[in-house]
Amino acid sequence: MKIIFIITLFVFFTHLSAQNKFKVEQKETETWRSLYSLIDEKNNLIKVLDSSKYYLTFNTDNYGYFAIFSKKGSPGWSAIDSDENILFQVYNTSFGEPNPDYLIENKIRIIDSNNKIGFANEKGKIIIPPQFEIVTSFHNGKAIIGEICDKIPWDKHAKENDCQHYSIVCKKYGYINELGEIIESGYATFEEIQKKINWKAPEE
């Protein structure tokens, strides 16, 4: 009986941890809403999402283990699996406009309720828990971190709810490895750390 119970548990947890790759298909309607469908790798429909809950996405046509949506009731960007479970919140890379992070070197930046940043991998598993005030994407296994940071507005805004654009300026910079370990942190400039580790932005 005990062996059967253990086997049952193993099968149960294996099923829970099993992840399915899928993509998002978007269909425009005559209203302002879009219909989003989750499609598996055999081109079968998994489900059609409730358009009253999901209202914006920046997903590509590629298959993946999660999709990123702006979801009613959840702040910012939510990464969901094929069962609509929220895996984590995705970091927005641009202040003042919607621009969720994406996978670079199989890592995506995530953010918690305290605005601390960490990383998840391509399978939707959190590999570096949110802990950094500011951190770049990875390049050649290293990412630049900033500490004691301020938002510097690009321009004065007429109203509080106007589109807000900022630059981030930090007093301390350093870098981490792929395990999230801080290798260096001090009063160097961003450019000095960038040159030291030969870090390049994704678009470069």
Image: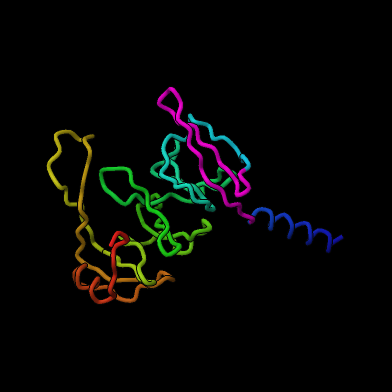
Going by the image, does 152 lie left or right of 113?
left
Give percent across and percent down for residue 20.
61, 52
Q: Residue 179 sits in which quadrant?
A: bottom left
Residue drawn at x 52%, y 53% as measured from the top left: 64
Q: 74 or 56: nearer the eye?
A: 56
In the rendered image, the residue lying farthest to the top is 30
Residue drawn at x 24%, y 68% as measured from the top left: 173
Give percent across and percent down for residue 108.
42, 58
Q: Residue 117 sits in which quadrant?
A: bottom left
**Residue 29 is covered by the magenta coloring:** yes
Residue drawn at x 44%, y 40% as measured from the top left: 74
Going by the image, does 132 lie left or right of 86?
left
Q: Is residue 166 above or below residue 108?
A: above
Q: Is residue 85 above or below residue 29?
A: below
Q: How many numbered markers are drawn?
A: 0
Q: Quadrant of the N terminus?
A: bottom right
Q: Is residue 159 above or below residue 19?
A: above
**Residue 63 is covered by the magenta coloring:** no
Give percent across and percent down for residue 116.
36, 56
Give percent across and percent down for residue 90.
41, 50
Q: 16 or 3: nearer the eye?
A: 16
Which region is colored magenta?
Answer: 18-43
